[in-house]
Amino acid sequence: MPNVIAINAQASQSIIAVQATSDDMLLESIAGGNRTAMHILYCRHNVRVYRFILRIVRDATTAEDLVSQVFLDVWRTAGQFQGRSQVSTWLLSIARFKALTAMRQRRFEDIDQEDVRQIPDDSDTPETSLDRSDTSAILRACVQKLSPAHREIINLVYYHEKSVEEVGQIIGIPQSTVKTRMFYARKQLADLLKGAGVDRFAA
């Protein structure tokens, strides 16, 4: 019986040690086939990756499938990570590729800003939204009305707290382009919020 207790204690200490390690160290362990490290990394990042993908594909089932694909890729390619970015940035890069590939298969990737504007808007009127006094819901609704490129920038910077440099790495565009898109995204979002009567966010 004491041996069993000792083994369980040792296993618990091992798990605690893995939980305390950095993402980079976890990837090194994953590259060596450590399933516990893979489990810890998944637990740390799966919700963030899921939400990121969901904002792109707008379908929960598809997002769940893609999250599984992302972490399967991590398991297979952990040894290829070179540490040039944060692990979270690398994960979102993989997630973005998977999500856009799924969108192409659904033939939605060519929708540009003009096409989006022509899609009927069945959302509540600004007055109805304000009556609910749910400014966060209004903000989310306005973000969804942005063009895909602008929505992606807002998503990464504000929801995932990525820097301009990291956004450029994830999307694969120059930092100057990131800044330009951010400028126009914020301007368009401010106009949408103002139109919805939420001036304090639009400022």
Image (tube, helix red, strand yellow):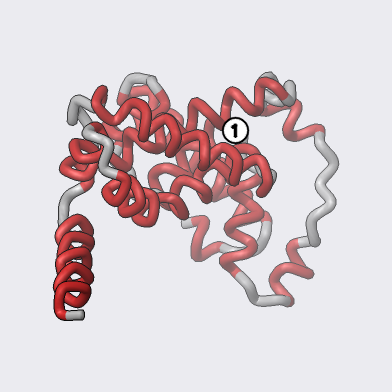
Q: Is residue 89 left or right of residue 155?
A: left
Relative vertical location of residue 141 with respect to residue 176 in this rendering, above or below: below
Q: Can residue 183 be seen in this view?
A: no
Residue 154, how many percent across, how many down? 47, 43
Left or right: residue 149 versus residue 169 is right
Residue shown at 46%/54% (left/top)?
47
The kind of residue on which mark 1 rests is Pro
Residue at the spot 20% in from the left edge and 40% down from the top edge: 29
Location of mark 1 (residue): 148
> Residue 19, position in %: x, y?
22, 59
Q: Is residue 110 above or below residue 144?
A: above
What's the residue at 32%, 37% (across, down)?
Answer: 89
Q: Which residue lies furthest to the bottom in this view?
A: 1
Would you place residue 20 above or below residue 128 in this image? above
* Viewer-proximal residue among 33 and 88: 33
Q: Residue at x 31, y 25 (%)?
A: 175
> Residue 145 appears at what percent x and percent y?
66, 44
Q: In this view, does 18 lie above or below 87?
A: below
- Residue 141, quarter of the rendered image: bottom right
Taking the image as drawn, is residue 44 in sight?
yes
In the figure, residue 133 lies in which quadrant? bottom right
Q: Nearer the viewer, residue 122 or 197?
A: 122
Determine the secondary structure under disc 1: helix
Q: In which quarter of the image is residue 100?
A: top right
Between 117 and 156, the residue placed more toward the observer is 156
Q: Give the side of residue 86 with respect to residue 105, left or right.
A: left
> Residue 83 in the image: x percent, y percent?
18, 30
